[in-house]
Image (tube, helix red, strand yellow):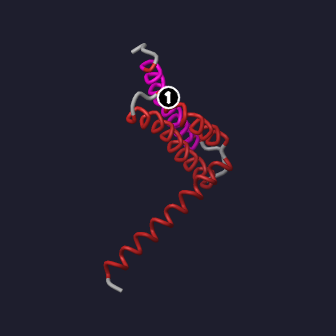
Amino acid sequence: MSETHRARNTGVQRLRQALRNTARGLAACARSEEAFRQELAVLVVALPVAYFVAANVWRWVALIGVLLLILVVELLNTGIERLADEVTRETSPAIGRIKDMGSAAVGLSIVIAALVWLAALAERLGLL
């Protein structure tokens, strides 16, 4: 077997493992985080709604993209919270601030999504 062929298999194997890790991470977060489940539900409802709101494919991508951004930030926030809890179970003002920063990031991503959706709706209704 040539080096090129082996490298390609390694790349494919690495991709398969990354996809498995992704699925496990999404499933773990969905099982344990109510906020993540709610955000997933919003995404499921928004997929068909975005089709009618978006004037073109790029607006549809933006509408769905900002909702996916919320999920990404929620996953990172959950990871930070879990890691902090593993470091210490004791109350720590520093860790509390770190967790608050993660929550703030989720909140800001929701604000971004709301702005994009409001602008798209206003445009669709002829208000912009």
Mark 1 residue type: Phe
User: Callout 1: helix, strand or loop?
Assistant: helix
Q: Residue at x 62, y 55 (%)?
A: 86
The part of the chain drawn in magenta is: 94-123
Q: Nearer the viewer, residue 111 or 20?
A: 20
Q: Nearer the viewer, residue 62 or 97?
A: 62
**Left or right side of 64 for 4:** left
Residue 29, magenta (yes or no): no
Q: Residue at x 44, y 24 (%)?
A: 120
| Extreme-bottom residue of the structure | 1
Q: Residue at x 51, y 61 (%)?
A: 19
Q: Nearer the viewer, residue 31 or 48?
A: 48
Name above or below for residue 111 compared with residue 128. below
Q: Main secondary structure of the magenta part?
A: helix
Which percent across, then down, holds residue 109? 48, 34
**Residue where numbered disc 1 is placed:** 52
Tell me where residue 36 sits by quadrant.
top right
**Left or right side of 25 for 115:** left
Which percent across, then down, holds residue 122? 45, 18
Which percent across, then down, holds residue 5? 35, 79
Image quarter (top left, top right, bottom left or bottom right) of the C terminus: top left
